[in-house]
Image (cartoon, coloured by chain):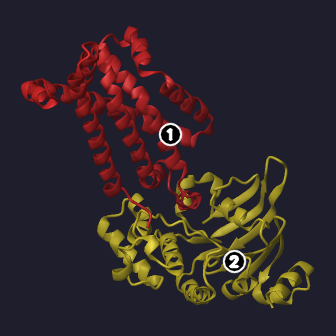
């Protein structure tokens, strides 16, 4: 049976898994942005937080995903919660790091001018630093999203669903068609996310020259 | 006096005094040039006035009120500040840059637009042609004009300029200096500007202050400066000829 026949026969299940996959990645990346952006601002503002925060984010990144899923099961149980928590942890590093880099990369003369003319710290952040750093931050979100699409396939191992369901089933039954049936849409999703966020980067954000 | 500086000192933790025992006053309509070689403490002095740095000792009085007793944001909005690199916000248009502080002060949009075009006209830029441009679409001289317009947005009584013409080519520089003189007469503000160019200082200022090693070594009019027998002043005057 070819992949296409498989899709034709199981169309509704395929769409359901794609949807699960997208939800898993979308929600976890969204949470990672909500957590990572303030953390990035924090470490850009206060140098003493930089080492612990970036250090922890770095360490999280190095834990093999299957192991992290396993470690989190006692906390969040089997299924979506554990998978989402792990994906958030993986997505944090690129977002925190790029927020930090984007903000500290703003020309000091611009920051000096803003402070000197009487902008408060919050105004400077909101109206100057974040808009100028937006491109770098968005690049971090893009990396986080693409990586998440891949890691989310492993979430099937702990019962969180997603396209990994086909891959693991295929591996277990030595069925290449099934593996391909899961891997193909996952790869397409990654490319799509990359393309869309790249488009946003080019069009929504101010660019020099 | 719009600006009154009394016994100002700024000391680094290492003990080095970048500014030491500085006292001077600037009235409305008066322009004081802070002269001195690099590292004399000129820029530090400006940053002490708008509290980008906190003085170790001494007092800065702006518009009759001790600066340390004023809310720092409010204080800075009463002091126009122009730096050499201009520091225009690259992601905002000319109008966005000039109108930023009025926007933060919650002026209505039509009043902001009116103020922007008023200021652009004042600094010699046609509002219709320049308001919508971004800083990178301007020449160095035009950017400097926008920087001055932005500093004037809230009509502050005091203006601080740090090497305002430093990064310009000689022709643009002379042109801007000439216009700046006309602007001084029209605005009647208290102005302090930093320069290491004696000629520029003597041309634009009503009074000249010479700094050396954080200390004030001379304070007087341009004529007094030219005629002064002080060695530190002579050295500076002769360098200009």
Q: Residue under mark 1: which chain is it in?
A: A
Q: Is residue A127 left or right of residue A186?
A: right
Rendered-image quadrant of the N terminus of chain B: bottom right
At x 26%, y 43%, the residue is A192
Chain in red in the render: A
At x 31%, y 14%, the residue is A158
Q: Quadrant of residue A32?
A: top left
Q: Disc 1 and disc 2: Cα gap in Å?
A: 45 Å
What kind of element bears circle 1? helix
Q: Which labelled disc corresponds to residue B116?
A: none
Specify whether residue A126 is in view.
no
Chain in yellow in the render: B
- Decide: is A150 above or below B113: above
Q: Residue under mark 2: which chain is it in?
A: B
Please give the residue where the numbered disc 1 appears in the rendered image.
Answer: A97
Q: Quadrant of residue B213?
A: bottom right
Q: Is residue A117 left or right of residue B222?
A: left
What kind of element bears circle 2? strand
Task: Kindly give the residue lying farthest to the top in the view shown.
Answer: A74
Residue B7 coordinates in the image, percent (x, y): 79, 61
At x 41%, y 61%, the residue is A207
Residue A6 coordinates in the image, percent (x, y): 12, 26
Task: Kindly give the residue lying farthest to the left in the view shown.
Answer: A9
Q: Is residue B98 left or right of residue B1?
A: left
Q: Which labelled disc corresponds to residue B32?
A: 2
- Decide: is B170 above or below B14: below
Asked if labels 2 and 1 touch by Cβ distance under 8 angstroms, the answer is: no
Residue B82 coordinates in the image, percent (x, y): 58, 70
């Amino acid at each position: 049976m070819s992949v296409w026949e498989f899709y034709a026969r199981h169309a509704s299940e395929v769409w359901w898994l794609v949807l699960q996959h997208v939800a898993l990645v979308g929600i976890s990346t969204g949470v990672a942005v909500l957590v990572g952006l303030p953390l990035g601002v924090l470490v850009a503002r206060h140098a003493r937080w930089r080492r612990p925060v970036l250090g922890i984010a770095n360490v999280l990144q190095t834990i093999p995903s299957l192991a992290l899923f396993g470690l989190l099961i006692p906390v969040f149980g089997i299924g979506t919660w554990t998978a989402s928590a792990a994906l958030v942890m993986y997505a944090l590093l690129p977002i925190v790091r790029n927020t930090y880099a984007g903000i500290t990369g703003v020309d000091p003369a611009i920051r000096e001018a803003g402070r000197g003319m009487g902008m408060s710290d919050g105004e400077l952040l909101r109206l100057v630093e974040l808009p100028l750093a937006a491109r770098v931050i968005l690049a971090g979100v893009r990396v986080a999203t693409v990586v998440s699409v891949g890691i989310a396939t492993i979430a099937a191992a702990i019962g969180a669903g997603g396209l990994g369901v086909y891959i693991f089933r295929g591996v277990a039954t030595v069925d290449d068609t099934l593996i391909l049936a899961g891997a193909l849409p996952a790869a397409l999703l990654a490319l799509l996310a990359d393309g869309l966020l790249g488009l946003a980067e080019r069009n929504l954000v101010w660019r020099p020259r | 006096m719009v600006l009154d500086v009394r016994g100002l000192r700024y000391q680094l933790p290492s003990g080095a005094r970048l500014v030491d025992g500085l006292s001077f006053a600037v009235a409305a309509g008066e322009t004081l040039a802070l002269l001195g070689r690099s590292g004399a403490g000129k820029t530090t002095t400006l940053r002490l006035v708008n509290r980008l740095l906190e003085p170790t000792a001494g007092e800065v009085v702006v518009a009759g009120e001790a600066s340390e007793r004023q809310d720092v944001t409010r204080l800075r909005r009463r002091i126009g500040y122009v730096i050499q690199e201009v520091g225009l916000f690259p992601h905002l248009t000319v109008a966005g840059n000039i109108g930023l502080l009025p926007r933060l002060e919650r002026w209505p949009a039509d009043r902001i637009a009116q103020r922007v075009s008023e200021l652009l006209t004042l600094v010699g830029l046609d509002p219709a042609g320049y308001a919508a441009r971004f800083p990178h679409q301007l020449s160095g001289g035009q950017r400097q004009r926008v920087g001055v317009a932005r500093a004037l947005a809230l009509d502050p009584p005091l203006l601080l300029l740090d090497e305002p013409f430093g990064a310009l080519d000689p022709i643009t520089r002379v042109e801007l200096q000439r216009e700046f003189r006309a602007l001084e007469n029209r605005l009647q503000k208290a102005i302090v500007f930093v320069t290491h160019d004696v000629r520029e200082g003597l041309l634009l200022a009503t009074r000249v202050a010479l700094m050396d090693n954080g200390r004030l070594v001379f304070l007087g009019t341009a004529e007094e400066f030219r005629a002064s027998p002080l060695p530190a002043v002579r050295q500076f005057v002769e360098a200009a000829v």
